[in-house]
Amino acid sequence: MKKLKSSARGKKRYLILSTSSKDEVEKIMLEALGTLGWAKAHPIFLEIKGKVVIAVDPMYVDGVRAALELSDKDIRIIRVSGTLKGLERNL
């Protein structure tokens, strides 16, 4: 299988969160964005140094941010970056 060109790959924004519970974040996002919003944001969950990192489509960063801020849980977004390397500098 041929490798995709970098211009053909989908872009992502990485959000590092102040929680370590992936399930809690999934539940909050599904409640706020709904199934269609979840599918459009296309979140991918990663774990780096004990923190939850979400990779989302750049057009839906604001929606994901609003969903997390409006929840009654104490989940904060520490930083948003275009690369994982940029996030690792602040850990």
Image: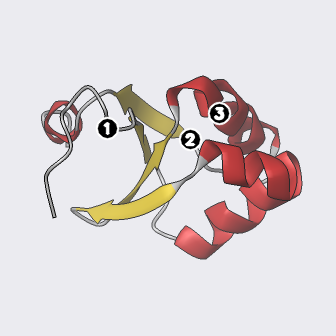
Tell me the residue at 13%/37% (across/down): 85
Residue 17 pos. (x, y %): 46, 48
Alpha carbon distance from label 1 to label 2: 29 Å
Which residue is identified by label 3?
A: 65
Amino acid bearing label 3: Arg
Which residue is identified by label 1?
A: 9
Tell me the residue at 76%/41% (across/down): 67
> Marks 3 and 2: which is nearer the front?
3
> Marks 3 and 1: which is nearer the front?
1
- Looking at marks 3 and 2 on the same chain, the residue that comes earlier in the sequence is marked by 3
The tag on residue 73 is none
> Between residues 54 and 42, which one lies in front from this camera angle?
42
Tell me the residue at 43%/35% (across/down): 78
Q: Is residue 33 left or right of residue 53?
A: right
Mark 1–mark 2 CB contact (< 8 Å): no
> Between residues 72 and 4, which one lies in front from this camera angle?
4
Amino acid bearing label 2: Arg
Give the image quarter of residue 28. bottom right
